[in-house]
Image (tube, rainbow, N blue to C red):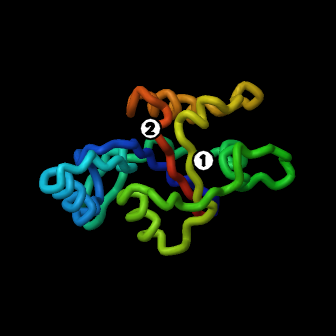
Amino acid sequence: MGCDIHFFTERWTSDNKYEGPKDLSEDRDKKLGEILENCEPNYRWVSADSWSKDDSWHADEMYNGRSYYLFAILADVRNGSSGIDPIDYPRGIPDDASSGYKYVVDRWDGDGHSHSYFTLDELLNFDWSKYEMLGDFMETIEQMKSIDPDPKNVRCCFFFDN
């Protein structure tokens, strides 16, 4: 049995157009505030992943590889004696996580661990040059750039299972 990452992308937006599980009350309240109270658009994190639904929702995760080397870099997971300095230690589930990410976390019902997140800006500013064998993840970072031109408006949220 191994450790896997569950990797989801989000974008910072005031738009209600997004795929996957929705918080309909939040969407409704946001829209009503804009229309009735002439409120400024409310920005929040929404899922940037593609989703499908059969019996339950499933995201097409942008990254789903298994690299313990990468896991150690991202969140000190499976680091053991390798001595890799992680970008950061697990930060937890963001308070403002998208409804899609919250949905997945709830479905794992506590079996997920080491929850964390990074903006694309943080990933782009990290020095990846001292690490090897991360081609798939470097492609994921490139793909994340297509979500929004501003890397501060793109975030990945992830956790691990055993």
Characterize the local packing of mark 1: few (<14), some (14-19) or many (20 or more) Cα atoms within 10 angstroms.
Answer: few
* Residue type indicated by callout 1: Arg
Residue 62 locus on image (x, y percent): 44, 41
Q: Quadrant of the C terminus?
A: bottom right
Disc 1, SS: loop
Label of residue 66 in the image: 1
Question: Residue at point 38% right, 64% down?
Answer: 103
Label of residue 6 in the image: none
Mark 2 and mark 1 lie on one chain; the one further toward the N terminus is 1
Q: Above or below — where is 37 with respect to 74?
A: below
Question: Residue at point 50% right, 42% down?
Answer: 63
Q: Is residue 37 left or right of residue 44?
A: left
Q: Quadrant of residue 149?
A: top left
Residue extending furthest toward the bottom = 109
Q: Nearer the viewer, residue 21 or 35?
A: 35
Q: Above or below — where is 150 with respect to 105?
A: above
Characterize the local packing of mark 2: few (<14), some (14-19) or many (20 or more) Cα atoms within 10 angstroms.
Answer: some
Mark whose residue sits in front, 2 or 1? 2
Residue 112 locus on image (x, y percent): 55, 66
Q: Nearer the viewer, residue 17 or 113?
A: 17
Residue 1 locus on image (x, y percent): 63, 63
Q: CA distance from mark 2 to mark 1?
A: 26 Å
Label of residue 153 in the image: 2
Residue 120 locus on image (x, y percent): 53, 36
* Residue type indicated by callout 2: Asn
Q: Is residue 30 left or right of residue 128?
A: left
Q: Is residue 31 left or right of residue 41?
A: left
Question: Residue at point 49% right, 32% down?
Answer: 151
